[in-house]
Image (cartoon, rainbow, N blue to C red):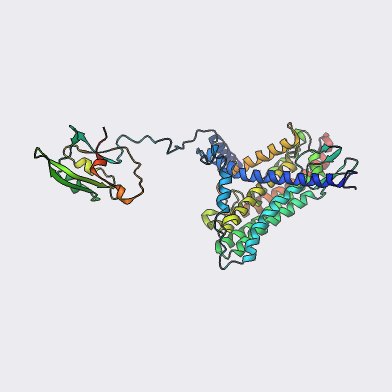
Amino acid sequence: MDIFAGHPWYMYFGAMILKVLAAFVFVLLTVAYATYAERKIIGWMQVRIGPNRTGPMGLLQPIADGIKLFFKEEIIPAEASKFAFVLAPLIALVPAFISFAVIPFGDSIEIAGYKIPLQIAAFADQAGTVFDLNIGVLYILAMASLGVYGIVLAGWSSNSKYSLLGGLRASAQMISYELSAGLAIVCVFMVSQSLSLQAIVADQGGLLGWYIFRNPFMFVAGIIFFICSLAEINRTPFDLPEAETELVSGFCTEYSSMKYAMFFMAEYANMVTVCAVTTTLFLGGWHGPLPPVLNFIAKVYALMFVCMWIRATYPRYRYDQLMKLGWKVFIPITLCLIMGNAIWVTYIAPMFNFAK
Amino acid sequence: MIAPLIKGLQITFGHLFKKAVTLQYPEEKPNVAPNFRGLHTLKVSHDKAKCVACYLCPTVCPAKCITVEAGEDANHDKFAAVYEIDMLRCIFCGYCVEACPVDAIGMTQNFELANYKRTDFVFSKERLLEKR
């Protein structure tokens, strides 16, 4: 494996830096304007207008919000555990962004004979074979679980009852839903027979090739994975760690200024990542009628619209309902899906000559 | 169990395309009801206020916000030399309008009474006089 593929070293590093910058800027801009889009869409769904005062159609609203939060006073509670209190927003934010490293956001492109796969953690060798992180999905699962440490730490270090309850809820919720999300992904592995996201996307060419349309079990698995992802990133209707009505603001009650903004950036970055992961695992990644990168972006944005749509529709689950849904509904269903999918892949698909 | 959830999504999606009911307030004004009880006005007839300073309005006023001082004009007629309404105390009940025997006081549809100084909320006779 020659990572430079016979080209000068600066081609490799240049391409890497460009990919990182492109993906990072894309996620940051999406995060900023997701807040705006969310307020607008929820506004429209509630027969309101939404923000429209800052700039044309309120388009400068995210920037105004950012500046406001940036200039606010930074308050650290006297009884807080200071180191953990400062560290927590970072721990929440970083995993949200670095999960994007393994997501293929486009087909490979060639610049001056140097093949660049549009995925940050990937390169092509001299023969044009693309190598990426071959345990990409596990990496995403690991990063997704890391994010919750930020929330738990924030809840504990604030030394406030509301924050602590928010943090506890976040960890309990994470453990419950990580299981069924993981089990739903097992269905993907059965079909793809690979953990590399590059291979998973390559296997999903054509509309019927999308994993969600492969067989009925995959369809349900895709929907359950998306719902569990919503629960993992604390989006409504599973936003119990924040639960304004019960816990003031949950784990970020004691936070202010940039640290508070970082929690919100993390939340929205997580949303982008989760939508990107769902797109990659179930909705065919960058495959589709448009140019590859645009396909990917369109699918991610469509899923983000669904997130906002769900937020505008459903009230928050009660805590026991949340646990019941996770443990008594989703886990049995996903276990059945795994069995059904296994039977489909080994017996039914070969019998009728379906694609796996 | 799933059907109501989907129905909920349908309803919110339907609302996405409805026209917003928002009133863009400073630019768009609301349609105030004809009998709205807003800022008071002293009605004018023959180029002078109709008020005869009978003191019925300060008597009936439950908030005691009206101050009237009678005066005598050249024709030896009684008139309100001072007529002040303290809008910070006024509760806009409209009893003064009901009590007035000569229909000298009325209420307009003006509800934008915000001001910067407390003293500005005491409306003098000049500010209350009906604009023609």
Could you say where residue A104 lies in the image, as x and y percent from the top left?
77, 43
Closer to us: A125 or B113: B113
Q: Is residue A250 above or below residue A197?
A: below
Q: Is residue B1 visible?
A: no
Q: Is residue A42 visible?
A: yes
Q: For residue A343, what is the image quadrant?
A: top right
Q: Is residue A263 above or below residue B76?
A: below
Q: Is B31 on the left-hand or right-hand side of A204? A: left
Q: Residue at x 79, y 42 (%)?
A: A200
Q: Residue at x 77, y 52 (%)?
A: A138
Could you say where residue B51 lies in the image, as x and y percent from the top left?
17, 39
Q: Which residue is drawn at 81% across and 41% down?
A: A117
Closer to us: A142 or A194: A142
Task: Point out the image quarter for the C terminus of chain B.
Answer: top left
Q: For residue A26, what is the image quadrant?
A: top right
Could you say where residue A260 lies in the image, as x and y percent from the top left?
59, 55
The number of callouts visible is 0
Q: Residue at x 25, y 50 (%)?
A: B63
Q: For residue A221, what is the image quadrant?
A: top right
Q: Is A34 on the left-hand or right-hand side of B88? A: right
Task: Point out the image quarter for the N terminus of chain B.
Answer: top right
Could you say where residue A184 lies in the image, as x and y percent from the top left?
73, 47
Closer to us: A15 or B65: A15
